Amino acid sequence: MIAIGIVPIILGISMYFQFKLNPTPMDDTQKQVFKLLPWVLMFVMAPFAAGLQVYWITSNCLTILQQKLLYARHPGLQAPVTKRTTFRPPARTWVPISSRPTRRSPRSSSSMRASCSPGMSAS
């Protein structure tokens, strides 16, 4: 049996509730991953220092509070994501290379001569 402490278990629970507040994923595979990932990460993060785990728990709780406040003010954000049936790439306007403007150097050779000190020549 794997012995993990109470802090990683609380971390897994806080991650689970944080993932539950995310908008519902459109793909069934994503749904399964979102349900399983907090519990897998609980075992992965168990050997880390307790202070780091407490930091993650605090961060998760603050994120949950922030999401709850955001959803209370803007209920439309909880709407599930709709799945697009077809992919249409955005239309692009292609410009031939010959018609593109050319880049010029910011300093020409005459300005280089002017910036040299009087005793130096810019040959």
Image (spheres, rainbow, N blue to C red):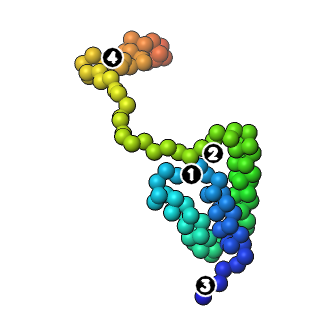
Answer above or below: position of 41 versus 102: below
* Quarter location, residue 72: top right
First reached walking from the N terminus: tag 4 or tag 2: 2
What secondary structure is found at the residue carrying circle 1? loop
x then y, percent, for residue 35:
56, 64
Q: Is residue 121 visible?
A: no
Tell me the kind of residue under disc 4.
Pro
Query: Image point 37% across, 31% down: which residue?
Result: 90
First reached walking from the N terminus: tag 3 or tag 4: 3
First reached walking from the N terminus: tag 1 or tag 4: 1
Count of labels in the image:
4
Tell me the kind of residue under disc 3.
Ile
What secondary structure is found at the residue carrying circle 4? loop
Tell me the kind of residue under disc 2.
Gln
Q: CA distance from mark 1 to mark 3?
A: 32 Å
Contact (CB < 8 A) between labels 3 and 2? no
Q: Is residue 67 visible?
A: yes
Q: Which mark is residue 2?
A: 3
Q: Which mark is residue 24?
A: 1
Answer above or below: position of 18 versus 4: above
